[in-house]
Image (tube, rainbow, N blue to C red):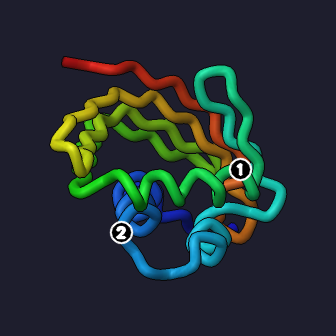
Amino acid sequence: MAQPDFHAFLTRLPHELAFSEDDPASIIDRYYTPDVRYHNDGITLDRQRLIDHVGPARRTATRLEVEVHDTVVEGSMASARYTMTAVTRKDRVIRMEIYLFARYAADGRVERVDSITRPIG
């Protein structure tokens, strides 16, 4: 199995999705398998729904910070607790604590995510 860079998944991926000029599909395909299932707060996103989610983020976010608090990586499984803070074009601050569990495919890309988010202060 390719060694996954879990820290990059948590920190670089959100920045690439929000601020890169690269095609969203190519970014998603770098980090996720084609059959990805991303389960977040009771909603399941497949590859296309992840790609579709990029447009609103790019139109809204002006700043994004990710602070990773805890991670565990063992074999093809990884988990994290981290905080993401986004600032919108209207200067609204959105802070979320995220609990994420990921399963990696043999090629090092994520094939499944289960996450729970909680808005904070």
Image quadrant for the C terminus?
top left
- Residue 34 seen in this snapshot: yes
Image quadrant for the N terminus?
bottom right
Residue 109 vs residue 51, the one in the foreground: 51
- Indicate the position of residue 118 as horizontal and vertical percent values: 39, 19
Q: Is residue 96 above or below residue 88?
A: above
Q: Residue at x 71, y 50 (%)?
A: 49
Q: Amino acid at mark 1?
A: Arg
**Position of residue 25 in the picture relative to residue 105 (left or right):** left
Query: How many circles with numbers are drawn on the protein?
Result: 2
Real-space Cα separation, disc 1 to disc 2, in angstroms:
18 Å
Question: Within 10 angstroms of label 2, few (less than 14), some, or many (20 or more) residues?
Answer: some
Question: Within 10 angstroms of label 1, few (less than 14), some, or many (20 or more) residues?
Answer: few
Q: Residue at x 28, y 42 (%)?
A: 68
As helix, strand or loop, the secondary structure at mark 1 comes to: helix
**Position of residue 13 in the picture relative to residue 119 (left or right):** right
- Indicate the position of residue 2 as horizontal and vertical percent values: 63, 71
Q: Residue at x 77, y 48 (%)?
A: 46
**Position of residue 36 in the picture relative to residue 57 (left or right):** right
Q: Residue at x 74, y 65 (%)?
A: 106
Residue assigned mark 1: 49
Q: Amino acid at mark 2?
A: Phe
Which corner quadrant of the image does residue 93 belong to? top left
Residue assigned mark 2: 19
- Indicate the position of residue 117 as horizontal and vertical percent values: 45, 25
Q: Is residue 97 above or below residue 24?
A: above
| Mark nearer the N terminus (1 vs 2) | 2
Residue 100 vs residue 96, the one in the foreground: 96
